[in-house]
Amino acid sequence: MDYLSLIKEPISSELEEFIAMFNESLEHEDGLLAQALNHIRQRGGKRMRPMLILLITKAFGSVTSVAQHAAIGLELLHTASLVHDDVVDESGERRGQASVNAVYDNKVSVLVGDYILSTALLHVSYTHSEQIVRYLAQLGRTLSDGEILQLSNIRNEAISEEVYYDIIKGKTAALFEACAAIGAQAAGATPEQVAAASKFGQNLGIIFQIRDDIFDYYDAKEIGKPTGNDMVEGKLTLPAIYAVNNSDLPSIKALALKVKDGTVNADEIAVLVDYTKTHGGIEYAERRMWEFHAEAQQFIDSMITDEAIKRALQAYLDYVIARTI
């Protein structure tokens, strides 16, 4: 099924307008900054988050300049966070393309990220909505908090599913949650509708991240990372958390702790990945995804009346869980 075409169908013209405005926001006359921004602009991506804003806005009203500038502000904030994340993680690649810090250096990357963040604030100010400005400002704080929580959890000996969800809610889910809430707010939705949209977005984000984490147990070049890459970085995600917490083998718990303290080697990672896959970790993570899917489905069934938007949001929800990259 061509999920992306179904998602785009009711917002095709609005999405084209967004892409043009977004690309224009990343243009600059200065040589070095212009080069770095052009490098980022070429990444493109599927535009999943802007599409969510546009769909939710259209579900509760019409897409105006308020929604467009809000979408640009949020996507720019997300872009800036990725530029900064690549510096923190010392990543050399992003979406199959060399990261900004790999092409230039960390100093340039941090400054470019700051420039993009400032541009995000500029665009969100064009909404003239105090509530939307507040959403974006809070999102910036939440994303930073989520990153710090993840870093602090790496060396924490506790292997907790609750902390795993806290980290997701402060990172990936926070972006989807803000998209849905801002989209509803831009349409003038009621507080109850905004809250429901916000929860829908959070569920989408949790599903999105669990699916990403499952990818880490399979070697696929299109995903852009080798098997066990999260463990190399000291991260235990939901499949391993489940398998380890339900294991009675001290050796498995010991391997998990070695992951968290950064002393694990490639052979040991392979053992833990294999154990996770053969002891129900993947199946458990998939069950949890479907539970969050069911929660998100309730929003579509009860809150969305426009049939075209309902089909698009259904395709969006199903794509997030069914995607292979």
Image (tube, rainbow, N blue to C red):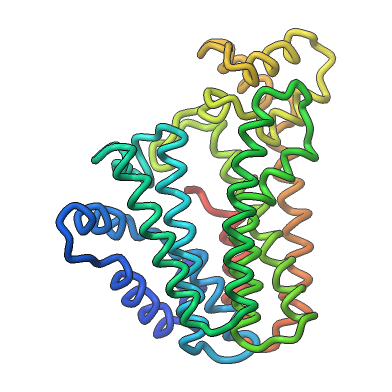
* Placement of 312 over or under 293, stated as above or below: below
* Placement of 188 over or under 3, stated as above or below: below
Q: Which residue is depicted at the point 60% across and 39% down?
A: 213
Q: Could you tell me residue 123's position as x and y percent?
A: 44, 75
Q: Quadrant of residue 160?
A: top right
Q: Could you tell me residue 294's position as x and y percent?
A: 77, 62
Residue placed most toward the observer, 251 or 110: 110
Q: Which residue is depicted at the point 39% across and 35% down?
A: 91
Q: Could you tell me residue 32's position as x and y percent?
A: 18, 52
Would residue 303 appear left or right of 55 to someone viewing this image?
Answer: right
* Placement of 24 over or under 64, stated as above or below: above
Q: Which residue is depicted at the point 43% across and 56% down?
A: 79
Q: Could you tell me residue 211's position as x and y percent?
A: 60, 46
Q: Quadrant of residue 310?
A: bottom right
Q: Which residue is depicted at the point 73% across and 14% down?
A: 252
Residue placed most toward the observer, 73 or 2: 73
Q: Quadrant of residue 166?
A: top right
Would residue 219 appear left or right of 148 to someone viewing this image?
Answer: left
